[in-house]
Image: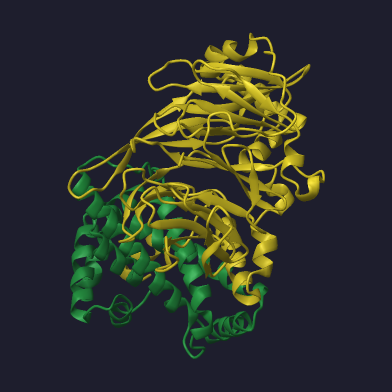
Amino acid sequence: MSRRDALGRALREVEIPLPGGAEERGLRVVEAAFAERTSGGSELRGAMTPKTSERLGGRPLPRLALSLGLAALLAVLVLSPAGAAVRSWVDEVLTAPTPRPEPTLGEIPGGGRLLIQSAAGPWVVQPDGSRRLLGDYEEATWSPRGLYVAVAEGRTLSAVEPDGTPHWSSTAPARVSDPRWAPFGTRIAYRAGRTLRVIAGDGTEDQLVAGSSAPIAPSWSPLGDPTLAYVSGAGALRLVNSESLVDLAAAPALDDVAEIEWGAGGKSILEASHGALRLREVQPRKLPPRPSIAVTHSLPVPAGATVADAALAPKRETVAAVLTNWRNHGTRSSIVVYGPGEAKPRRLLTVPGSLGEVAWSPDGRKLLVTWPAVNEWLFLPLGRGRESAVANISRAFAPGGRAASFPRVDGWCCRR
Amino acid sequence: MGSESGANEQKLVREAQAGSSAAMAELYSLHWRRAYRAAYLVVHDAAAAEDVAQDAFLAAVDALDRFDLRRPFAPWLHRIVVNRALDWARREALRRRVDGAESVFEPLPPPEEVGGEMIAALKDLPAEQRAVVVLRHLLEYTPGEIASMLDLPRGTVNSRLRRGLDRLRETAELDAVGEERR
């Protein structure tokens, strides 16, 4: 063997860490990209994006929660000391009475305007409850002040006014999903196939930011800088400057992370998976402004519970979560709130069955919680105030009043 | 690469250009592990290496129509892999200088029982030296080919290689490496 072969053999044979499933994961991404190249998107559509009917079931978390096995739940129940320590605040609470629902959607408790995604497309709901279908789009997101809505359909990303008037459209290289308008208003991040892209708020300057991203919506820094958080295809939480394209920081994301959200103060990023919630501390740097991802705070999830959805409050680093417990006598769901610095979450409500999503009102004083099993929305006050409920939600977002699947909440926007 | 395997690869590229997803998958299977290994040995971060390898294949898919069938596929792919890995390593080094010593990464530790010293020795090299060592000794390109891949003068490649091997020689397992150059 030659001398040089000794080094070559060492490099070929040295054991290196190989993330489980990495090769297969990459192959799926490459196959999807290849299908996109050869078919102009039709194969990608089938392979990578849930059908509309599935999407209307909500974001990925509820599906993840439902798929968790009973054995895993029991194991967590027995083995997790942290879970055991907080078990009581869900287990020992009796199911609370829920408010009598209003038969139809009237004035929105908490004010603001809602963006609701139905099988027919996104609807804008005005503060008085009146609503307008924007068109045949699959996803929608508010601009920061609610002057526009970015909507996605197939490979097209568009900006429309809340009355449906179109402003611009842009065709992406692959199917568009998860658009998110930056808080400073001049950029929209979105996923095209598996890639992450950013386009200017006027529909120009579209550019690739990352070649591979997990199927999770990115989240903008709230501090007015062009920093974007996303989860890479390899499962890392990454921060990138969307203008210079410089990678700023990275850290392993939660296993099976299903949602990320950057907190209003810019100091933390919420990560949620079916079994865990945690806040990653983000440390801004002065020269130059490069943030880093540092300390992690796990939020206690009771043993045996799964996270159906979670959301950060608009002004404080308070997290609201929908937790679901499977029990011998049936499923129960709770809405809990994790306040900053509080050791234990506060339970707002427990109901039989499964709750869906949770969204904060623009002023952070109310929560909208969806309850698909009984076709209702619940509005829960954080402080003083009255709980309220609205029935017949599916029908409210079905053109012509036909019965339809339960709609998804895509945003609760700012007051005008 | 032998002429037979080269011809087979050329056939796969031609079929992929014509739209065969099976041919693309076979090209991927033939090259992914080597691409990942090369990326890892430059970046020393498993998640980043996975991203680099995946991005390189996505770039290959994007550029497939423009690929010159008279040229071999592997060097083209390896050029993308190593350049992207270098970009990543440089950005990470810059970020660490700016942010201080605190690392935000929690890379998997290198296995201790096999090759731990090798990984540690390689990791101690500057990224530019790691890249040329990986291209020369793992992927077996000539200094001239490496110069072309990294867009560097050949003398620079030789000097980076020499410095890298000098430092690697200090690792017990690799004493022979230094002797190679004498």
What colouring method underlies this structural image? Answer: by chain
Left/right of residue B93 with respect to residue A32 in the rendered view? left
Compared to residue A140, the image places residue A201 above or below, namely below
Apparent colour of chain B: green
Q: Residue furthest bottom?
A: B70
Q: Is residue B89 visible?
A: yes
Q: Is residue A256 visible?
A: no
Compared to residue B28, the image places residue B118 above or below, namely above
Instruction: Return the residue nearer the eye: B155 or B13.
Output: B13
Instruction: Return the residue nearer the eye: A89 or B89.
Output: A89
Please tell me which residue is depicted at 62% across the width and 18% down the height of the picture. A349
Apparent colour of chain A: yellow
Q: How many tags in the picture?
A: 0
Please tell me which residue is depicted at 48% across the width and 83% down the height of the picture. B72
Instruction: Return the residue nearer the eye: A128 or B175.
Output: A128
Across and down, in percent, residue B33 comes to 50, 62
Across and down, in percent, residue B91 comes to 28, 57
Left/right of residue A274 with respect to residue A312 in the rendered view? right
In which quadrant of the rendered view does residue A314 lie? top left
Please tell me which residue is depicted at 72% across the width and 24% down the height of the picture. A101
Please tell me which residue is depicted at 71% across the width and 31% down the height of the picture. A69
Q: Which quadrant does the C terminus of chain A fall into?
A: top left
Left/right of residue A24 with respect to residue A145 in the rendered view? right
Compared to residue B158, the image places residue A108 above or below, namely above
Q: Which quadrant does the N terminus of chain A fall into?
A: bottom left
Left/right of residue A162 with respect to residue A246 in the rendered view? right
